[in-house]
Amino acid sequence: MNGIELLKKAFKLEETKRAPWVPFVGVHGGKLIGVDAETYLKDAELIKQGIEKSISLYQPDGIPIVFDLQVEAEILGCKLVWSKENPPAVISHPLLEGTPLADLKLPEATDGRIPVVLEATKAIKGKYPELGVYGLITGPFTLALHLLGTEIFMKLFEDPDYVVELMDFCTEVGMRYSEMLLDSGCDVIAVVDPMTSQIDPMSFETFVSPYAKRIFDFVRSKDKYSSFFVCGHAQQNIEVMCDCRPDNISIDENIPLDFVKETALAKGISFGGNLKLTSVLLLGNELDSKKEAVSCIDLGGVKGFILAPGCDLPMDTPVENLQAVTELVYSEYAQQATREMEHVASLEPMSLDGHFADDKIVVDIITLDSASCAPCQYMVEAVKQAAADFDGAVEVIEHKIKNVDGIRMMMALGVQNVPTTCVNGKVAFISQIPPKSAIIEAFEKELAV
Amino acid sequence: MSIPLQLITGFLGSGKTSFLKHYWPYLSQSKKVAVIQNEFSPVNIDGQELKADFSCEMLEVNNGSVFCVCLLGSFIDSLRQFVDQVKPDLLLMEASGLSDTLGVGQVFQSEKLRGKIYLDKVWCLVDAKHFDRAPALKLRLEHQVRSADIVLLNKLDLYDGDLNELKTDIQKMNPFSALVEARHGQIEDYELSGKPRFFMVEQAIGGRPDVESVVIKSAQSISEKALRSFVQNLNGACFRAKGFVRLENGKQGFMQAVFDQLEIKELDQQAGSTELVLIGQFDKSVNLQLKYDEYCRL
C-alpha cells in the first residue's frame, strides 16, 4: 500500500497492517547531502535532494518537506540568526520594537523563503505521488511569540484583547500559508506549536483553541488532513488539543504515548510520536533505536498510530539509527527479535572463556529461532551446508535469543542484528543470507590465519 | 579531570544574569570558571552585558534552543571545542528562560562529552515579586523549581508580601531543594548554599576523571521495587542520584541514592514525569535511559 493511503487509514482510525512511518527530516536532509543548514534551507533544489535521499534511506510513508518554524516570522520582520547545524533562530520581535500590529501584512507566495518551500514541495509531490507530503506551518501561538517575544506571557493577563487580536492575525497567516502549501501538493498540514507547552489548559482554551481550530477546519474544508505538533511538557494540554479537532496529534518523549493514545482515541483522533530524539536516536546505537521503536509500536498499536520522532531530527542523527527504525517498521522479524531483547539491560554478557578452540573454527549464529524465523532458518542452513565441506573443522552453534543465554551470547559477541553469523568471534554476515561461496571464503580465510 | 557544570535556570527576568555576575567572581578566586550563555534574547543582550562587565571565557549558544530538545544536537560540538580550548575547572551555564531545564543535561552523554563534563548542580532563580504574575506559566515554574538543587528566592528587596507564605509555596513544589534568599542576585554564603544536600555524607566527586552525569527523563511510572533494582544493578557505578520519580501508584516520589544506598520518599501530590540526574562512572555500552524504561515495564 502506498504511504499516503496508509496514513489516511491511520487518520481515519482504520486498522493499518503496520504503523505508518514519518521521519521528521528537517536539516538532517542537509547532512545527508553534505550541506550546512543555512545553505540547505535557502535552496529548493538542495531540499529536494535531501528529501529524495531520505526517501531512499528511510522509506517513509510520509515526510515533511521543510521543518523550519521561522519561515513566516522572517517575512513578518523578525530578524534571524542562521546556524550551520540548526534551523535559524528568531532574535528580534517587531511588535516589541514598536511596529504596530496593523502594519503587519499577510504573506504572499513570493515572500521570503516561501517560494523555496513551495518549489521543493511541488518537485517532491510530482515525483512521489504516493508519498504523504507534510507541509509545516508555525502554530499561531508560537508565531505570536516570535512577533511579540516572551512579553506575550504577561500580556495574556495584562492585555488579553491585544493577544486575541494578535492570535487572530497569526491564524490568518497560518491559513494563508497552509493554502499555498496545499495548492503545491501537500497532503497534510502540520500546525507546529511547541510554545503552547508553556501554558496551562485554561489559557490554552482561551488563547489557542479557537485559532487552531480555525486552521484545522480550513484544512478539512480543502479535503486534506491536519496534524497538531507539540513538544515539551504538554501533557496537561493533550485533551484541549484534541478538542481543536485536528486529524492527528503528534507529541514528543515528554508525554507518555499510552496516555496520548487513550486521550486521543477517546476523542476519535489519531496520534503519533514519540521516538526519543536525544538520548536514543542521536546518542544511542542501532539496537537502542530498534528497542525504542518497538516499544513505541507496541504501545501505539495498529489503530490511529503514526510512528515518528518526537520532533525535528537533529542534523547529526546517525543514518544507521534511522535505518534501524526503518528496518523495524517493515520487518516483523526485526520487531520480534527486538522484543526478545527487552531485558538486555539487566543481563551480563556470556563469558567467552573456553568458547573458541585452536584446532577448529567456531561459528556462532545468533537467531531469533531458526524454527520460527525464516531468515534465521535460511542463514543457519546455508552456514551448516558450507561447514559440511570442512570435515568437522568448522563447528556451527546456533544461539536463540528466545532464551536468556542466547541474549547473553549476543551481548558477548557484540551482535546488534538478528540473524548474524560470527566466525571465530568476529561478525561475518548480518541479516542477509550470504551465498555459499562467500561463507566458504570466510572459513578459508580464517583457516589461513 | 571531568569538569563540573552548574546550571542556572529561572524565568526570563528572574535575575539569572545578575546572579552570574556575583557568583562568577566569587568562584573565580580559586578556579578557572567559564560561562555558557544560552539565552533567547535580542542579539544576546545578556551575553554582551556579561562580557562588558568582566572578562570571562564565554560560549554563546544563540540557536534558539527555546523550543525543545530537538535543537540540542549541534551544541555538542561547540561545547566540546570550547572546553578543549579553554580548559576550565568549572562551567556555569545560564539556561534559556523557557527551555526544558534538564534536557540540556542529556547531551553530556554524547560520546564527545562523556566523562568530560557532568551536570553537578542546578540553581533555579525565582522572582519573588513576580512569582504570581503569570499564572499561565505556573506549571513551567513548578517544573523548573522541581529540577533545582538550590532555589534562589530573588528580588526580595522588591517583595512586599508574606515571605513565609512564599517559601511555603515553593517548598511545596520541591521540599528537597535548599531555599536561599537573594537580593539583586546576591546571596550571603555561596559555599553553604551550594552544598549538595544528601541524606548521607557527600562523596567527593570532583577531581576524578571520567565522571559523567546522566539525565533520565521518563513519562512512564515505575514501581518502588523496580526502581530499587535499577539502582542496585548499576553495581556501584553511580556515586549519587537524585530526582523526582513517577511512581506506580500515581504518586510522586523523590529519590536520592549514594552508590546503591537508596532512599525513596513518597510525596502527597500528583505525579509529574520522572527526571533523574545520575552522577558516576557508568558502563559506556549501556544506554541508561533505555535501561530505566525497561525497569518501568518490569
Image: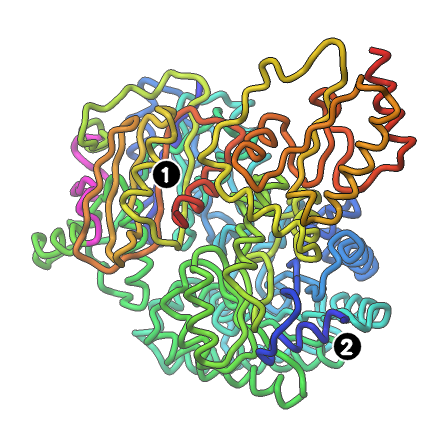
Q: For the stretch drawn in magenta, what is the main secondary structure?
A: loop
Q: Nearer the viewer, residue A310 or B125?
A: A310
Residue visible at 51% across and 78% down in the picture = A269
Asked where in the image residue A275 lies, by quadrant, the reply is bottom right
Residue visible at 21% across and 49% down in the picture = B174
Residue visible at 69% across and 62% down in the picture = A66
Residue A320 drawn at (x, y percent): 70, 43
Q: Residues within 10 Å of mark 1 (few under 14, many from 20)?
A: many
Asked where in the image residue B132 lies, by quadrant, the reply is bottom left
Residues shaded magenta: B173-190
**Residue B7, which numbered label?**
1
Compared to A218, does A84 lie above or below? above
Label 1 is found on which chain of the structure?
A: B
Element under label 1?
A: strand
Residue visible at 47% across and 28% down in the picture = B57
Left or right of residue A404, residue B189 in this image: left
The residue most toward the bottom is A221
Identity, as a three-letter code, of the amino acid under mark 2:
Ser
| The stretch drawn in magenta includes residue B181 | yes
Residue A423 drawn at (x, y percent): 75, 24
Asked where in the image residue B141 lies, by quadrant, the reply is bottom left
Label 2 is found on which chain of the structure?
A: A
Which quadrant is the C terminus of chain A positioned in?
top right
Q: Residues within 10 Å of mark 2 (few under 14, many from 20)?
A: many
